[in-house]
Image (tube, rainbow, N blue to C red):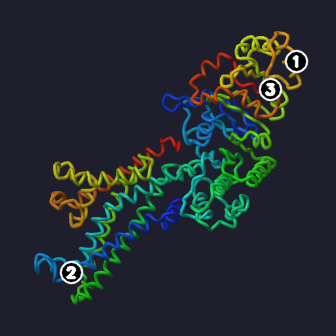
Amino acid sequence: MIDPSLALATRGLRKSYGSRLALDGLDLSVPAGVVYGFLGPNGAGKTTTMRVLTGLVHADAGAVELLGRPFTRRDRRRLFDVGALVESPAFYPYLSARENLRALAASGAPTPAGRIDEVLEIVGLRERATDPVSRYSMGMKQRLGIGGALLNDPTLLLLDEPSNGLDPAGIVAIRETLRHLASIGKTVFVSSHLLAEVQQMADVVGIIASGRLVREGSMQDLLALEGVVRVRVEPAEVVTATARLARLTAPDRVTASRTEPGWISVQITPERTAEVNRVLAEAGIFASGLGSGNDLEELFLTLTEDTTADPDGKFAGIESTTGRLAPAEVLS
Amino acid sequence: MRLFVSALQKLAPRMATLFTFGLLAGMLVLIDIAVVATRGVVEGGPSRSVNALSLITFPGAYDQILSFILGLGGLFAVTYGAAIAGSEWTWGTLKTAVVRGESRSRYLAATFAAIGVVLAVGLLFAALVGVIAAAIGATVAGIGISGIGDRAALEALPAHFLRGWVAITETAAIGFAVATLARSQLAGIGVGIALYFGETFAGLFLPDVVKYLPFHLATAVVGGSTGFAPVPSSAVAAMSTDTALILVAVWLLGSLVVAAGFGERAEITG
């Protein structure tokens, strides 16, 4: 059943490269007209998702809906309404920016005359438009790559790490451009590992780990409901402490860190930090460290902590038994 | 059509294009300079010297120039085809077209069509430079250029050139397909050159089989007259030029079908 309010959706997307499982039943729901931050640690499956969404690779199973219609191997024209920058920007190094955009405009959707100059203006490369791309800095190439994605004035924009190589001014400019695009009804799907950047830019966030969605929802709701309190105890006391803290919330919301011995994360609003401390003290366990927050970084680390140490997802089965990678809880 | 025009615009200023045809023309000029400079002092006596001077003696020079271009051009073409196809993968430019919704096979076909046109223009350019260099050489050597307007020779040139162009285009298609399968510029060029010389070497042992392979067929299309090609004329003499032309067309189309089919199904992950 296709939801017309969604600009992009995936259902049970699976993809393997040989024996390595890159996507493991990924379900995404991207509302139209928002900036969607797509987050995940290295190797989580972000780029594979981008590749599937743009027809570069084909999923082994599952379905993709683009702009309210199914997108399969035969529907390449659906991408006429999509702009994408997947991985690093790619250009003919001996051609200028304008010539490269002209070459790009010759493929895919017809591009109106004058659009190339508009795009060069948007990404701030008009002054250097006649220089060969081989003389461009990494940040300039990145901006040109974003310009290429904007060339067909897309309804849906898919950007893979768009801030790569950009200086602070460039990051701000791109953020404002993407916010502006969302404000005029375009949908922007941004894959990134720059959490602070996504927190400032995105309306909706999806977090994946080991090829599965672990959380998805509006930024506001996630940060309001998904606060995290982190507490450090003696490693020998972790099991007892975890059990005690589970009574405070739920067993699947308390996790002992695999990478930082003694650290326990409790998904609970930061206002209850003192309560966490009290529960431990009542059990005769005294915290040597205590922190709380409801920023995206805390949430991201809590949800993906173990998979960052396991980018190949070899322990995916073990994690699923803890409940931490259970099917995503959609908050809004 | 816009894809094809765009592909032409991309190929024209490219270093691979300028280098390939510049080198071909430059070598012709150098050979003519060598012939002129060593006239009368060629080891082997007057007969060898006269033989060398045939390179700058019209109307026979026309055939010599074409033979050189079509012979060495095969090696250059396989390299050129591989360089162009491979760079689409190495630079990721095929990827950017695909994510815009472009048909992969249409994109590859347009790119190869542009290569075919560039090959025709490039070979014409090299031939023109060769004729001018030979004319200058003939004048300097005191041979004269009275045969340059020989009607029979000039009338035969277009057909000979056209056949040669088809043969060269076929070798470029081999390089194009190999680089597409390898998804790499360097690997494509390396394997393309290896195939070229490998086939030549195999021709010494398996002439009955190798005569159906692409580079031998390319030579056979022009009647085995490419004296500068590494393929001995005897290896291709048994086949008529028309049969060779048909087989060359089969190899050409087959290579493009393989490239397009692979490109259509390939997972673009780089």
Look at mark 3 in the image and give the residue it sits on: A228
Assign a secondary structure to mark 3.
strand
Task: Name which residue type carries label 3.
Answer: Val
Q: Is residue B253 left or right of residue B236?
A: right
Task: Name which residue type carries label 2.
Answer: Thr
Look at mark 2 in the image and give the residue it sits on: B38
Q: Chain of mark 2?
A: B
Is residue B152 in view from this perspective? no
Residue pictured at 23% horizontal, 77% vertical: B55
Mark 1 vs 3: CB contact within 8 A: no
Q: Which of the two residues, B80 or A250, is positioned nearer the viewer here?
A: A250
Is residue B134 in view from this perspective? yes
Does B34 sit above or below residue A295? below
Q: CA distance from mark 2 to mark 1?
A: 100 Å
Does B43 sit above or below residue B194? below
Q: Which of the labelled discs sits on residue B228, or is there none? A: none
Look at mark 1 in the image and give the residue it sits on: A275
Task: Name which residue type carries label 1.
Answer: Glu
First in sequence: mark 1 or mark 3? 3
Q: Is residue B75 left or right of residue B111?
A: left
Q: CA distance from mark 3 to mark 2?
A: 88 Å
Q: CA distance from mark 1 to mark 3?
A: 13 Å
Q: Position of residue B71 (x, y in %)?
A: 27, 65
Q: Position of residue A152 (x, y in %)?
A: 67, 54
Are the residues under badges 1 and 3 in a single subunit? yes
Say which quadrant the N terminus of chain A sits in. Answer: top right
1 or 3: mark nearer the eye? 1
Q: Position of residue B32 (x, y in %)?
A: 27, 78
Q: Chain of mark 3?
A: A
Question: Alpha-carbon neighbours of circle 3 within 10 Å: few (<14), some, or many (≥20)?
Answer: many
Assign a secondary structure to mark 2.
loop
